[in-house]
Amino acid sequence: MKALNLVKNTKLLTVLLIALLCGSLAGCNDDADIASRNLSKAADNFEIARRVVFYNGITGDYILSVQGLCSVQDSGHKVAFTCKNNQGKYVKHQLGLSDNVTYFSEQLSAHEVSVYQYRVTFKPDAIIPDFNIRSQLVGDVTNE
């Protein structure tokens, strides 16, 4: 009986130590890291106005400039950004990067975010897929 209680107590102590370790590691982030992540999350939800400028480092010319509620995705060799326009519709732009073409993204105004809690976005509507049927028997049917 004592051996069973010892095993239960050891398991409980192990679980508590793991929870304490995880909690202490989560609390080791700087305010700037949490604010930066929350700003990125807000921008990805089209809440922050940005200006994205593509620049040719050799000629000094601006190749492309886009301003608005934009989310930027940098894959290393290509930058894609999706923007929400005034009508609530979305446009996507992409530009390849090279050794002489670079870009910068500027946030146009301050935005209030938490430095204590990470922001999590849960969209239950995204769980149910939007189906489009294409067939030779039936014309294109979209859910628009």
Image (cartoon, rainbow, N blue to C red):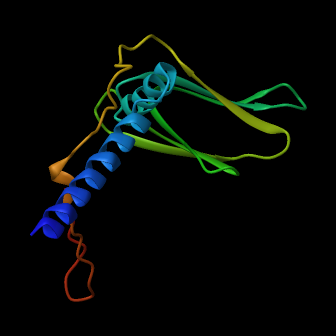
Taking depth in this image into account, of 62 and 141 the one nearest to the observer is 62
Q: Quadrant of the N terminus?
A: bottom left
Vertical relation: 11 (above or below) 111: below
Q: Quadrant of the C terminus?
A: bottom left
Residue under the point 22% across and 44% down: 122
Residue under the point 31% across and 32% down: 119
Q: Residue furthest top?
A: 110
Taking depth in this image into account, of 109 and 87 the one nearest to the observer is 109
Q: Residue furthest left?
A: 1
Q: Residue furthest front?
A: 2
Picture coordinates of residue 41, whole percent (x, y): 39, 34
Does 14 sit left or right of 50 as displayed?
Answer: left
Vertical relation: 6 (above or below) 107: below
Picture coordinates of residue 100, whole percent (x, y): 85, 39
Taking depth in this image into account, of 68 and 12 the one nearest to the observer is 12
Picture coordinates of residue 136, whole percent (x, y): 27, 88
Residue under the point 13% across and 65% down: 2
Picture coordinates of residue 29, whole percent (x, y): 47, 29
Q: Residue furthest bottom?
A: 137
- Can the viewer see residue 48? yes
- Can the viewer see residue 129? no
Vertical relation: 98 (above or below) 57: below
Q: Quadrant of residue 117?
A: top left
Number of numbered discs overlaid on the protein picture = 0
Q: Quadrant of residue 88?
A: top left
Does 112 sit left or right of 55 as displayed?
Answer: left
Taking depth in this image into account, of 113 and 85 the one nearest to the observer is 113
